[in-house]
Amino acid sequence: GDAVCFLYLGENDDTEDDKLTCYPKDLLITYGLGYNPHRFLVIFGFVPTDMKEIWCHFVFSDDNPYSVDVSKMVFQCKDGSIPQDVWDAVLYELDPSKDIELMRHDPMAKFYAAEVLNNHVAKQLEELASLREKIDFVVDGENLDLIKMHNHFLTDAFHRVQSNLKAELGKH
């Protein structure tokens, strides 16, 4: 939800159980959904530019079984890779009657999925560019620098995704 949570994880006494966890000991602060930078800006007033992944901004049909877990409908920020969960959700949208396993290995299905995602990412980048132009006309604002940082972060992430999609489309 939309809240800051503080979790006490116990003391760090270097027992075997402690070595199995990837979390730091004592206190962990979480801001909830870690894949949606908009929430951080609007609700908490900061922009995390070190996010591992962002929501793909793709709205799938309600009956798509591959998009049920919204937290898996993400793009990787660092390298722009697209998880298989997103590919599967797009493939399902293209033809719900076909077996996903078969579609994953069908070059034409993969091409059409890449085309759909590329068009989507291009639209996201156009919207971000349009917003950037509007932001440039704002003279002063309390969160103006944060809004610019947010736009820049999303633009960079979507450009990395677009590069991967163009490479995928170039294979065909």
Image: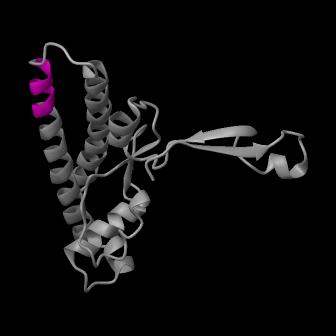
Give the residue drawn at x 43%, y 58%.
Answer: 71
Q: Where 31 sits versus 104, above or below?
A: above
Task: Name, please, the residue furthest toward the top.
Answer: 139
Q: Quadrant of the C terminus?
A: bottom left
> Which of these two is toward me, 79 or 6?
6
- At a point 38% along the width and 70% down the height, the residue shown is 68
Residue 133 among magenta residues:
yes
Q: Is residue 115 magenta?
A: no
Picture layout, residue 45 above or below residue 19? above
Question: Over which residues does the magenta segment extend?
Answer: 130-136
> Where does the image place residue 156, in percent across and percent down from the top left?
30, 32
Residue closer to the observer: 158 or 70:
70
Query: Whole-percent x and y of residue 124?
Result: 18, 44
The residue positioned 18% from the left and 52% from the top of the image is: 120
Residue drawn at x 25%, y 24% as measured from the top left: 148
Direction bottom: furthest residue: 97
Residue 127, picture quadrant: top left
Residue 105 shows up from this direction:
no
